[in-house]
Image (cartoon, coloured by chain):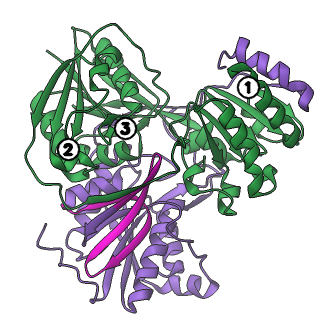
Chain colours: A green, B purple
Amino acid sequence: MTAVLAVLEQRDGAVRKTAHEVVTGARRVANDLGGGATVDALLLAAGPVRGAEDLGRFGADKVITLTNAAFGSYAPEASAAAITDRATSGGYPVVLFAASATGKDLAPRVAARLGVALAQDVTDVTVEGGAVTAIRPVYAGKALLKVKFLGRPALLSLRPNVFTPVERPKAGTPVTAAVAGGPGRVVVTSVKAAEAGALDVAEASIVVSGGRGLKEPANFRVLEDLARAFGGRAAVGASRAVVDAGWRAHADQVGQTGKTVSPTLYVAVGISGAIQHLAGMRTSKVIVAINRDKDAPIFKVADYGIVGDLFEVVPRLTEEIKKLHG
Amino acid sequence: MPAVLRNSRFEDPVKIAVCIKRVPDTETRVKIAPDGKLLDEAGVKFILNPYDEFAVEEALRRREHGGAGEVVVIALGAPAAQETIRTALAMGADRGVLLQVDRVPADGLEVAKALAAELKDGGFDLILFGKMAIDDYNHQVGPMTAELLGLPCVTAVAHLEIEGGKGVAEREIEGGVEVVDFPLPAVLTTDKGLNEPRYPALKGIMAAKKKPLDVKPTTLRAGGLEILALLPPPERKEGKIVGEGVAAVPELIRLLREEAKVL
């Protein structure tokens, strides 16, 4: 029977949030393929993975965990080899990854080993007349490219936060197998973790970003207060201007030379809305802009705008959000 | 590891290849060509892909640090990509190669195959790419080329140290930074933060005109992707200015709850 392969990520032995989205995407493709196509979820880990038992709920019929000591941290070469083997032996027509830092690194390696094409950072995937088609943003999000896969398997990575997880009351069948082999030549020796508890802008469902309008680095406190008011779901982002000025870390930069985000709610504060910035956030579901300049380009993409002094508006907004969550 | 790549020791002069791309300027207004599949290039200004600038800069710094060596820039693209190569030569690269095609295909693997064929007998210690091109956002040609050459690869490198034939790179991941060890020769793709690319000086621009640029007509296969359409992004529905100043906050909250349903 036909199956779609969903390559999932774990870190420190726990399934990453993007895994639910990739399984959801795979379920959709399997349904589109028809003929009772199923979803195989694939995890590479050093041992049992927390959250693997939940993947059935998001659409995985089988949850395959391949174990090797090297998979305790990201091992690009060993991972690419294991996934390539599985993709080949399973005869999958479609293999999906997350377009995360890891997925974007891993998918091209697998594509080259399989000798097939790859579409990265896909925002939509469909099956039309048996052929897999994908849509992905190009030219800084100013256009969408629709491509059709001519060969098999079709490899795609899915943009985070776009494929909203859909649950169903089912469980997946767990399968575990050890795989042989060393870690490879490229070895992750450590991960310097960001501040404890800080969400990454690329993964947060709410992003509050600040630009030059904040006037000085210390003033980002007002955005941090707002983010906190959302109760652990929000991250603080930054425009290129303030990152280049050294006010915020590059890891927080949203835009063309930073991260692409697609949260449920994006709040742009004191950001004019240069094209480089829009490239990184225009697929957000709802955009709110707060800016003193009523002609700022950010208002052209914002669903809701408030013209005014951010130092008055944002604290008030924080108060109101606290009331909601109070 | 292919025998053709010499076992690198950085006591030797370094030989570095940088693969670059000619792309439309970020500020370009995207107009779709009448065929509905490609960018209408009329009036479009082209630049060296910004991520590739980090790669060129890193190569130049490595050569300058070593006191000797060679930096070769390689582009796959249309004849006009010669200008892009000249830009990298003006920054300080030693020579250029253009793998000349009519059009860069949608399938990055075909590009990687052509680059790998050009690179494989070059004896490079280091092969650098930008982490992605700002036109097609393909995000794949560097690591694919590494796989085809059988070389180790680290992508999106934001910090790099190389000593004695070994490298340590740092790359941003969600919620942290990975520290990665790798041996040379290797393929790396560069991210913002790695360095501050220099601007070509007038002297460099003059010198670049005399530097060798080898144009090699190249034929690519169609590859595994067919472009069906280049589409305008979905119109965001007309936004509204909720109001001015703090007085507008309660209404914004109401709209986010009742209309957008995100709170």
- Label located before the other in sequence (3 or 1): 3
Give the magenta-colored segment's residue range.
B150-179
Instruction: Tell me the distance, in whole angstroms, between the alpha carbons under discs 3 and 2.
Output: 13 Å
The local crowd at label 3, few if under 14, some if 14 to 19, many if 20 or more residues have their Cα within 10 Å, is many
Query: Which residue lies at the image location 26% right of the left edge and 13% below the top edge?
Result: A171
Q: Identify the amino acid type marked 1.
A: Ile
In the rendered view of the protein, which quadrant contains the C terminus of chain B?
Answer: top right
The image quarter containing residue A317 is top right
Residue A299: x and y in percent read: 78, 34
Nearest the camera: A16 or A129?
A16
Q: Which residue is mark 3?
A: A119
Q: Which residue is mark 2?
A: A115
Instruction: Tell me the distance, in whole angstroms, between the alpha carbons under discs 2 and 1.
Output: 51 Å
The image quarter containing residue A33 is top left
Q: Which residue is mark 1?
A: A321
The answer to if B158 sits in the magenta stretch is: yes
Residue B91: x and y in percent read: 53, 78
Residue A284: x and y in percent read: 60, 31
The local crowd at label 1, few if under 14, some if 14 to 19, many if 20 or more residues have their Cα within 10 Å, is some
Query: Which residue lies at the image location 61% right of the left edge and 26% below the top edge?
Result: A285
Please, is residue A7 above or below residue A75 in the view? above
Q: Identify the amino acid type marked 3.
A: Ala
> What chain does mark 1 sit on?
A
Q: Nearer the viewer, mark 3 or mark 1?
A: 1
Badge 1 marks a residue whose secondary structure is: helix
